[in-house]
Each structure stands twice: as structure tokens, then as C-alpha cells.
């Protein structure tokens, strides 16, 4: 299923947020033209060299795109970009705050020239506002959004181990662009979308925000355990296997007491008879549960949990995820070409049919072809290249 075939996306993108959004559009068949700096390209190309010499970040979020090198600060490069946008459906950018507008690529100007264009600006904090000019990287936004206040342990905060604020902004940009394209199909008019990493992350903070409604105490940082539901977290079996398990309701709690702890009367103990009570008394209850896990091997413990049934999971390392049996059984791993050879790639979640798995582009790989489509003669392209414009 590639419903965006025939849709052209031009993106002045870097790092994760915008590239992740446009890769989702490419997964659905859109033509995504990634505009990069001549010579250097998207700086995410240089984050690391773990994938056959290529950056893990870049390989992840840039498959199925075309790379055009272009210096849009040069008037000749800007003229090329404007010609490219004249045939585009969507323009995405996540440059430094104000950079696109200063270059004459602000949403108002672009949409005045083409009211059908969908313009998506992705930034750290959005505009206007006192933070609109601030640089914003993922960890900065995790900090501003309050996310660090609920992750880690009681003693130490911890960042989320992935670029969660970038990903959140990228996904809201993606879904908002899809909505704008649907609206344009009905009205013939595009839209300006202003997606903020802060707002995307704060949206995901809804539970802890409401938990502190009207000045209530915030949820404590609870490490790998749930902050407010108990028992819900890791326990160590006799053979040192760490089992993650969760009791979500009173029916499960009664069954867990009877069939796992072998103490059915514990379910009626006033200290543990509701989740609020269990959470308030988690230290004492945790000692009881930990003692029972210490009597069992990991296999014995998970078999008992499965029979109740109570939710449980293995605490996998990344090597385990590469060979996860559920991903293999569902055929989720495919392959994608890169400038350094073929590498595994996960099919996009929820997309019906064979996934689009076009190559990860080399820097400037499609420059000549794209400029040729715009009607630039080979001699002019050669001159632009010689002068560093492309």
C-alpha cells in the first residue's frame, strides 16, 4: 500500500525529527527529495560509523529518499529550490530557528506563491513565544518538558535512551501532514503546520501532568518499575533471570496471590487490597514478591505467570531484539541498499502489503537527475558544481 505515490515532498532536513517524519511519508510512497549541504550533507551522516561505516541514525531515518546537494544561501541555489518547490506538494524544514524565513522560505511567503502547498516547520519550541529562538536538541527538550523528572531513580534522573522528543515531533509532523493532505483533497487548499518538540513531548507527559493536578505530589522516579502501579516492574529469579511483570487490576491481583505467591489471603489484606494501598506499601510487598521469585528459576516463574495469566516479559538486550522470535515470525525484517551494501531494515508498522524499501542515498546521489528534471542544461549544472552551489 503506497497511497502517497505521486506526492512530492521537498525537505530541508537534518538530524532526526524532520528526517523521521519524511521517511514515514516515503514509506507510504511519497517522493522525498532531501536537500543537503554540498560537501557535508545532513550532519547526522557523521554521528557514528556503526553500519558498515555509515551512521546508525542516518540509515534508520533516510531510506527511500533522493539526495540533492544545494546551497540555498546562494541566489542560484535558492532559485533552483524555488523551481523545485513549484512542483511540490509538501515542504518540510527543521533548520535552526528563523533560518528558513530569513532565506525567503517562510510559510507565509511560500503559501502565497502556492496556496496548495503544505508547509511543515519543525522546531524545538514553536513560534511565537519567549523560547522560539532557542536551539533545541532532544535532551534539552526532555529537560524542559519535565520528562527527566519522571525517569531514572529516586537519586538520579536519567534521559530516555532514544531520541524520544525528536521521534515525538517527527510522528506528529507525519500525522499532521497526512491530515493536511486529506483536507487539501477536499478543499484544494494547503496548510501551515508548526510542530514543536516541546509540545509533542508534553503531550506524551499527560499522565504525570494530570497526576499532579492542582499541586498534587508528582510520581516518584521509580527506575524500571512503574511509578504508581504495583506490582509492576522487574524481579530477579533464583538463577538471576530478571523478569518484568505487571498486575493491572484486582482480578489479576487475587489470582497472582493465589497461584503465584500461594498466599490467597494476602489479596484481602487491607495494606494490599487496592492498587493505591499496594503502591503506598510497595516496599513491604516487594519483599514478599521478591522472596517468592528467589525460590523459582526464571523459566518456572514465567510459566506460573503465563498460567494465571499475568503480563510478563524478558528484559532483552539489543542483541536479543535483533533475533526476537516474534519479529521473525511476522516477517518484519527486510533489507535495504545503502552506499555501503545491503543492511537489515524493519518494515514500517501497520503498512499493508509489501513495504517500500528503496535505498538510503549517498550524499548528492540524485543531484544531476533532479536538476535535469528541472530543465537545467548539463553545462549549467557543471558550473554550479564547480562553484560549490550543488
Image (cartoon, rainbow, N blue to C red):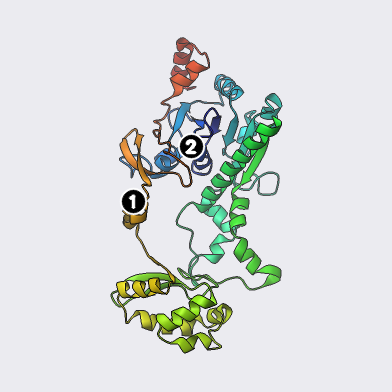
The reply, left or right, for residue 121 in relation to residue 366 is right
Among all residues in the image, which is located at the extreme left?
239
The reply, left or right, for residue 332 in relation to residue 96 is left
Please provide percent x and percent y for residue 214: 71, 69
The reply, left or right, for residue 375 in relation to residue 107 is left
Please provide percent x and percent y for residue 258: 43, 83
Please provide percent x and percent y for residue 169: 57, 47
Q: Determine which quarter of the picture holds residue 385.
A: top left
Where 98 sits versus 139, above or below?
above
Label 1 vs 2, first from the N-terminus: 2
Residue under label 2: 1
Residue shown at 41% from the left, 81% from the top: 259
Residue shown at 40% from the left, 40% from the top: 59
Q: Say if residue 370 shows up in the picture.
A: yes
Residue shown at 55% from the left, 29% from the top: 7
Disc 2 element: loop
Residue under label 1: 328
Front one among 363 and 351: 351
Which disc number belongs to residue 101?
none
Disc 1 element: helix
Please provide percent x and percent y for residue 352: 47, 42
**Disc 1 and disc 2 in contact, CB within 8 angstroms:** no
Where 379 sits versus 244, above or below?
above
Label 1 crowd bin: few (<14), some (14–19), many (20+), radius 10 Å? few
Front one among 290 and 187: 187
Where 40 sits versus 368, above or below?
below
Front one among 348 and 35: 348
Q: Say if residue 107 shows up in the picture.
A: no
Amino acid at each position: 500500500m503506497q497511497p502517497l505515490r505521486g506526492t512530492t515532498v521537498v525537505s530541508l532536513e537534518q538530524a532526526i525529527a524532520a528526517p523521521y517524519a519524511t521517511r514515514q511519508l516515503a514509506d507510504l510512497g511519497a517522493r522525498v527529495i532531501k536537500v543537503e549541504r554540498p560537501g557535508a550533507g545532513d550532519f547526522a551522516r557523521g554521528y557514528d560509523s556503526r553500519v558498515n561505516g555509515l551512521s546508525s541514525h542516518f540509515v534508520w531515518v533516510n531510506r527511500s529518499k533522493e539526495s540533492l546537494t544545494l546551497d540555498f544561501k546562494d541566489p542560484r541555489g535558492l532559485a533552483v529550490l524555488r523551481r523545485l518547490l513549484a512542483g511540490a506538494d509538501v515542504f518540510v524544514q527543521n533548520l535552526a530557528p528563523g533560518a528558513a524565513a530569513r532565506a525567503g522560505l517562510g510559510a507565509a511567503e511560500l503559501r502565497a506563491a502556492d496556496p496548495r502547498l503544505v508547509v511543515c516547520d519543525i522546531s524545538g519550541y514553536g513560534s511565537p513565544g519567549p523560547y522560539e529562538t532557542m536551539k533545541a536538541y532532544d535532551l534539552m527538550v526532555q529537560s524542559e518538558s519535565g520528562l527527566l523528572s519522571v525517569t531514572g531513580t529516586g537519586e538520579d534522573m536519567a534521559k530516555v535512551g532514544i531520541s524520544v522528543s525528536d521521534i515525538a515531533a517527527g510522528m506528529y509532523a507525519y500525522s499532521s501532514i497526512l491530515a493536511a493532505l486529506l483536507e487539501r483533497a477536499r478543499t484544494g487548499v494547503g496548510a501551515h503546520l508548526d510542530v514543536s518538540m516541546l509540545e509533542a513531548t508534553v503531550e506524551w507527559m499527560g499522565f504525570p501532568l494530570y497526576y499532579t493536578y492542582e499541586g498534587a505530589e508528582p510520581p516518584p522516579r521509580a527506575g524500571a518499575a512503574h511509578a504508581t502501579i504495583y506490582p509492576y516492574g522487574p524481579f530477579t529469579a533464583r538463577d538471576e533471570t530478571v523478569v518484568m511483570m505487571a498486575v493491572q487490576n484486582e482480578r489479576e491481583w487475587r489470582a497472582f496471590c493465589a497461584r503465584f505467591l500461594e498466599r490467597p489471603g494476602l489479596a484481602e489484606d487491607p495494606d494490599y487490597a487496592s492498587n493505591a494501598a499496594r503502591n503506598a506499601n510497595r516496599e513491604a510487598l516487594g519483599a514478599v514478591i521478591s522472596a517468592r521469585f528467589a525460590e523459582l528459576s526464571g523459566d518456572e516463574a514465567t510459566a506460573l505467570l503465563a498460567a494465571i495469566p499475568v503480563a510478563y516479559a524478558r528484559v532483552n538486550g539489543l542483541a536479543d531484539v535483533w533475533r526476537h522470535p516474534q519479529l521473525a515470525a511476522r516477517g518484519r525484517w527486510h533489507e535495504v541498499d545503502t552506499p555501503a551494501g545491503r543492511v537489515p531494515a524493519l518494515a514500517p508498522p501497520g503498512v499493508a502489503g509489501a513495504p517500500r524499501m528503496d535505498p538510503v542515498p549517498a550524499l548528492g546521489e540524485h543531484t544531476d537527475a533532479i536538476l535535469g528534471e528541472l530543465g537545467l542544461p548539463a553545462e549549467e549544472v557543471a558550473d554550479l558544481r564547480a562553484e560549490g552551489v550543488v
